[in-house]
Amino acid sequence: MKRVYELDVYKLAEELSDLIWNDFDHWDKKVQNTIGYQIVRASDSIAANIAEGYGRFTPPDRKRFYLYSRGSFEETKAWLRKLIRRKIVTVEQTAKYQIIIEKLGPKLNAFINTTKIIE
């Protein structure tokens, strides 16, 4: 069995959160104190919940955390839309985020769907 940090879905989640983490330093204090801390926590939570679920024993436990991860992914996208709409991130940065998001979303859904729960 692979280690969690070897999974493509986990690597993409880490890539997204690292990109946000690095961009955070370039935002002014108003943005950092409002959207900034929220999006850092949400994006970090994507990979953290994948890791926590991966370490759980039963499929229902695993799936619950993977679903939390998807919720954090959706929250991250909501904060990113605000940053884009308010012109905090550049067109170039937006393109980088979009590439990762377009890969991560389907991989996360597929990963969740592989966790079968027998009722």
Image (cartoon, rainbow, N blue to C red):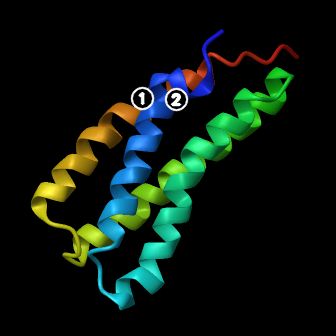
Assign the C terminus to one quadrant of the image: top right
Describe the element under mark 2 as helix, strand or loop: helix
For this orientation, the residue located farthest to the left is 91
To which residue does mark 1 refer? Answer: 106
Residue placed most toward the observer, 88 or 70: 88
Residue 63 x %, y %:
73, 30
The kind of residue tagged 2 is Asn
Please give the name of the residue rendered at 33% of the width and 53% of the height, measured from the top-left corner: 19
> Is any part of residue 44 visible from this angle?
yes
Residue placed most toward the observer, 68 or 92: 92
Residue 57 to residue 23: above or below: above
Q: Residue 109 got which mark?
A: 2
Tell me whether the residue at label 1 lies in contact with that at label 2, contact meaning CB atoms closer than 8 angstroms.
yes
Residue 54 x %, y %:
71, 28
Residue 85 x %, y %:
24, 72
Please give the name of the residue rendered at 75% of the width and 37% of the height, measured from the top-left corner: 64
For this orientation, the residue located farthest to the bottom is 30
Describe the element under mark 1 as helix, strand or loop: helix
Please give the name of the residue rendered at 46% of the width and 85% of the height, measured from the top-left corner: 33
The kind of residue tagged 1 is Pro
Residue 112 x %, y %:
61, 26
